Image (cartoon, rainbow, N blue to C red):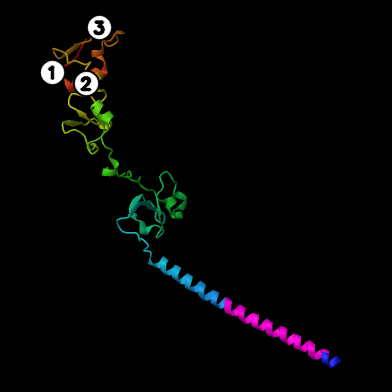
Amino acid sequence: MESFQNNKFLKIFITVLIVFFILLCFLIVYLFLQNQKLSKELLKYQTQVSTTPTPSPTVEDKVLAIQITVCCSCPTKVSRSLIGTDGWVIYEKGKNYSRFLPEECKRVDCQPCPPIEIEIPTPTTSDIINISDTDLSNGWYWGDKNQKKPGTPNDWVYAEEGRSSCWHKIGVNCEFSPEQDSAYKCPENGWVNCMPGPNNPELKWECTEEYQQWAKINCPDYQGVAY
């Protein structure tokens, strides 16, 4: 009887062991297949990434930089590819670089750096706004010689006045609309009588600075004011 029970227990143990072994084999096969699948996905991703070209710095791609490994280095334009090599770092305006320089630089008397040249970009077509109805109504708009708006009438002219430069219709002051200009008349003899003087509390409108600027542009025989 006891021998029979022992054989029965042995059979159960062997059966459980076989089932466990089979499950272990299935698990190993499953993990192997998952690993193969993951490897293929990773290889596919790496291939996609590697085919994307990485832009490399060119000589034309320049930045304002300073070299902190040498004494008396001044901000200068260098290729972006040099940044991070030989002490080249991008220059930041107002930053004190003395603490980054070699110790011996404290005993060197450097000359002042030349002024930093600032490039003013040339306006492109996308930067220029078409002339508006308000501009056409006023007869003028602010802008330099390179900022003539598309649609500007051919008979408009450019007036060089520094920061007050403008494009305008002939006979129109760049600070006034045609309605305001129509109130201004050129003096008959070229002179404006501003007696009794510039401090007169009842100063005539012909004696104002605005009118004088208008007259200089629009009155060929204008001579000025008389006191």
Question: Which kind of residue does numbered mark 1 sit on?
Answer: Asp
Dividing the picture into quarters, in which one does residue 187 lie? top left
Give above or below for 12 relative to 206.
below
Dividing the picture into quarters, in which one does residue 132 lie? top left
32 lies left or right of 117: right
Please state which of the two labelled residues, at mark 1 or mark 3, is closer to the viewer: 1
Direction top: furthest residue: 196
Is residue 21 highlighted in magenta?
yes
| Disc 2 and disc 1 in contact, CB within 8 angstroms | no
| Nearer-N-terminus badge (2/1) | 2
Direction right: furthest residue: 1
> Which quarter of the image is occupied by the N terminus?
bottom right
The residue to which callout 1 is attached is 221
The residue to which callout 2 is attached is 214
Give above or below for 80 relative to 163.
below
Residue drawn at x 68%, y 85% is 18
> Which quarter of the image is occupied by the C terminus?
top left
Residue drawn at x 27%, y 11% is 198
- In the image, the segment drawn in magenta is 5-30
Residue 124 appears in the rendering: no
